[in-house]
Amino acid sequence: MIKYVNSKENIEKYEYNGFFVGWPKPPSGKMLKKILLNSNYTWLAIDDKEQRVVGFIYAITDGFISGYIPLLEVLPDYQGQGIGSKLVNLMLESLEKLYMIDLICDKDKISFYERFDMRENTGMSIRNYSNQSGE
């Protein structure tokens, strides 16, 4: 059974291996813990039986007007079970009082996010791939 938690005290007791499939320089599990601990909102999907994190989403926000969701990840073996959708819904509920909630995704993910009433927008970004691991 998958349980969903948003308490930061749960972050430290789990390992974070197997995420960031296809990334050339993924963040380490140690770095991911730091990222999650330093975010404003974090939701974890935990496989109760295996006692492991199988998905996560986090957001950074000013707490008043805007929020940004940098990452949603679900382990490959757990994809297609509704875990990502549940995590997005939980995060959007956490951020519902904000004026704007933004995220950037690859084109092949647009239809996934449209299910949550998100709309495609134009944006700009910089990607320093040499810093992708966060180290």
Image (tube, rainbow, N blue to C red):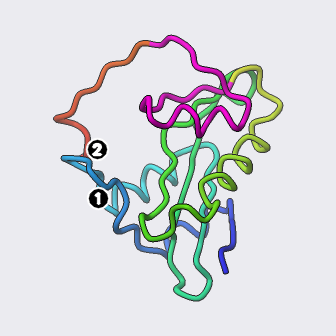
Tell how many labels: 2
Residue at 50% x, 53% y is 36
Residues in magenta, as a range = 101-123
Residue closest to the eye, 134 or 83: 83
Residue closest to the eye, 78 or 8: 78
Please provide percent x and percent y for residue 43.
63, 56
Q: Are marks 2 and 1 in contact (CB under 8 Å)?
A: yes
Residue at mark 2: 134
Instruction: Answer with mark 2 or mark 1, whichever residue precedes in sequence.
Output: 1
User: Viewed as shown, does residue 100 lie left or right of 46?
Assistant: right
Q: Which mark is residue 28?
A: 1
Outermost residue to the right: 97
Q: Amino acid at mark 1?
A: Ser
Q: Which mark is residue 113?
A: none
Q: Amino acid at mark 2?
A: Gly
* Residue 112 painted magenta: yes
